[in-house]
Amino acid sequence: MEIRFQDVRKIFQGRSGRVTALDGVDLRVGEGEFVCLVGPSGCGKSTLCNMLAGFDTPTSGSVTLDGELVAGPSISRAMMFQEPALFPWMNVRDNLSFGLKSLKLPAAERRATAERFLKMVHLSQFADAQPHELSGGMKQRVALARALAVDPVRAADGRAVRRAGCPDTRPPAR
Ligand SMILES: Nc1ncnc2c1ncn2[C@@H]1O[C@H](COP(=O)(O)OP(=O)(O)OP(=O)(O)O)[C@@H](O)[C@H]1O
Ligand SMILES: [Mg+2]
């Protein structure tokens, strides 16, 4: 899988005027590469991630995944947000299972996957807790488990998922 940002520019029209969040960004991330973006607060890291996730679009330039323009969110690109962004009305188990529902896994497999990832982040005992009952770090662990549980890399291997950017397509069997 190859991620490419080509001459990406992002301008926000905020209440306090125009902000150029990104300008002239060229970035290539190859298969299996692990990349960290480091920079001062406000330099555009989250803006860049949001565009890769498909939550926002560049003002100019392009963001592509294996040559295909990122046109919106997809199960093949999981995002762990800066804020945990948990659904406050759902318990921990349901928050974690949210993405799994769109994969249309059988209920038993969905439950087993959710339990496995809850265990991985040491939160099995908090499966029925609401987000407001968790510490900041525990919320982040639920968010991490939610992002990993959908197995985005495998999902990206499903050609139909990639082509359609379709969150309703089941990834290949494990
Ligand atoms: N929705 C928005 N509307 C207006 N301006 C925005 C919006 N989102 C981000 N910005 C501006 O774009 C710039 C980059 O913001 P961004 O959130 O990408 O920074 P960051 O590098 O992630 O910072 P931090 O390390 O503090 O999280 C900032 O000046 C911010 O005020
Ligand atoms: Mg940020």
Image (tube, grey):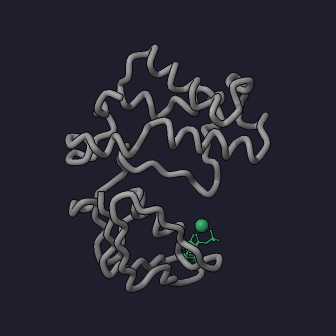
Which residue extends farthest front? Answer: 32
Image location of residue 76, percent across then percent down: 35, 46
Image location of residue 37, percent across then percent down: 53, 71
Left or right: residue 19 compared with residue 151:
right
Q: Can you say whether 163 is above or below 94 in the image?
A: below
Look at the image and tell me in which quarter the N terminus lies: bottom left
Image location of residue 55, percent across then percent down: 42, 57
In this figure, what is the number of numbered marks? 0
Image location of residue 35, percent across then percent down: 48, 66
Residue 42 is drawn in which quadrant?
bottom right
Closer to us: 126 or 98? 126
The residue located at (50%, 79%) in the rendering is 21
Look at the image and tell me in which quarter the C terminus lies: top left
Closer to us: 37 or 71? 37
Left or right: residue 131 compared with residue 90:
right
The residue located at (55%, 51%) in the rendering is 80
Quadrant position of ligand 2: bottom right
Q: Can you say whether 84 is above or below 46 in the image?
A: above
Which residue extends farthest top? Answer: 108
The residue located at (31%, 46%) in the rendering is 156
Q: Can you say whether 29 is above or below 20 in the image?
A: above
The residue located at (62%, 30%) in the rendering is 118
Left or right: residue 53 compared with residue 64:
right
